[in-house]
Image (spheres, grey):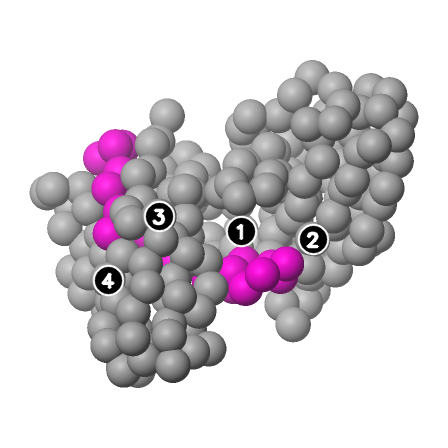
Amino acid sequence: GENVEQHPSTLSVQEGDSAVIKCTYSDSASNYFPWYKQELGKRPQLIIDIRSNVGEKKDQRIAVTLNKTAKHFSLHITETQPEDSAVYFCAATGNMLTFGGGTRLMVKP
Amino acid sequence: DSGVTQTPKHLITATGQRVTLRCSPRSGDLSVYWYQQSLDQGLQFLIQYYNGEERAKGNILERFSAQQFPDLHSELNLSSLELGDSALYFCASSATSGPLAEQYFGPGTRLTVT
């Protein structure tokens, strides 16, 4: 089945800096790659997704890039704010959605 | 608010007991997914139902079972509970069953087994 690796597991940045989270996947048939943000004790919320026919997608301060040849995709957050602090999960789906292990992002004011 | 509801919010029970978690999908969604999230761990897919039928199975223990009813709500039954079953259980829903379907998560049920 699909295996998704996510790095780093924790990331600390200064407010205003950029943050990058990277994921690799194993199943070349995977074609949908969502990113979820989860605040402490709350539900995961879909923040952005990308499909295999697209290389990059942007939504305000958030962007996701996909390299299907290398089987990796990344989340980029620019101009980070304290409210961006949360755990971020990448996921990949071929037959079912498989999540990465999560990245705890801390934005220091 | 995603439109997905889950009850109860919290559940405390003893080892060996059985509990039922309930999920109502967003209006119009036919697929329901169940996930388990243990402390400091990622989301583990358990099972998916689509329009009343089991569609995909993940790492679901034999002590766990689920079903989706004609009104599309779903229940996850956990039996012979062990301490290690303590976790957040999330339900998600999507409009279709396919792999490209966007999933929207409910608020979760926190299960504590003592």
**Inter-mark Cα distance, 3 to 1:** 32 Å
Q: Which residues are magenta?
A: A22-45
Does the stretch in magenta take in A32?
Answer: yes
Q: How many marks?
A: 4
Q: Are marks 3 and 1 in contact (CB under 8 Å)?
A: no
> Residue at 76% across / 36% down in the picture?
B76
In this picture, is B107 found above or below A14?
above
Horizontal side, residue B31 vs residue B41: left or right: right
Tell me residue A61's x, y (percent): 29, 79
The amino acid sitting under disc 2 is Gly
Query: Is residue B73 among the parts visible in the rendering?
Result: no
Residue hosting label 4: A20
Residue nearest the viewer, comparing A30 with B15: B15
> Residue at 67% across / 34% down in the picture?
B53
Residue hosting label 3: A9
Q: Are marks 1 and 2 in contact (CB under 8 Å)?
A: no
Horizontal side, residue B7 vs residue B53: left or right: right
Element type where label 1 sits in the image: loop
Horizontal side, residue A16 vs residue A38: left or right: left
Question: Which chain letter matches label 4?
Answer: A
In this picture, is B106 found above or below B11?
below
Task: Between label 3 and label 4, give the one nearer the viewer.
Answer: 3
Please tell me how crowded label 4 is: few (under 14), some (14-19), or many (20+) other residues with Cα within 10 Å: some
Element type where label 2 sits in the image: loop
Question: Which chain letter matches label 3?
Answer: A
Q: Are marks 2 and 3 on the same chain?
A: no
Query: Is residue B110 among the parts visible in the rendering?
Result: yes
Question: Which chain letter matches label 2?
Answer: B
Q: Are marks 1 and 2 on the same chain?
A: yes
Q: Earlier in the sequence, mark 3 or mark 4?
A: 3
Residue hosting label 1: B96
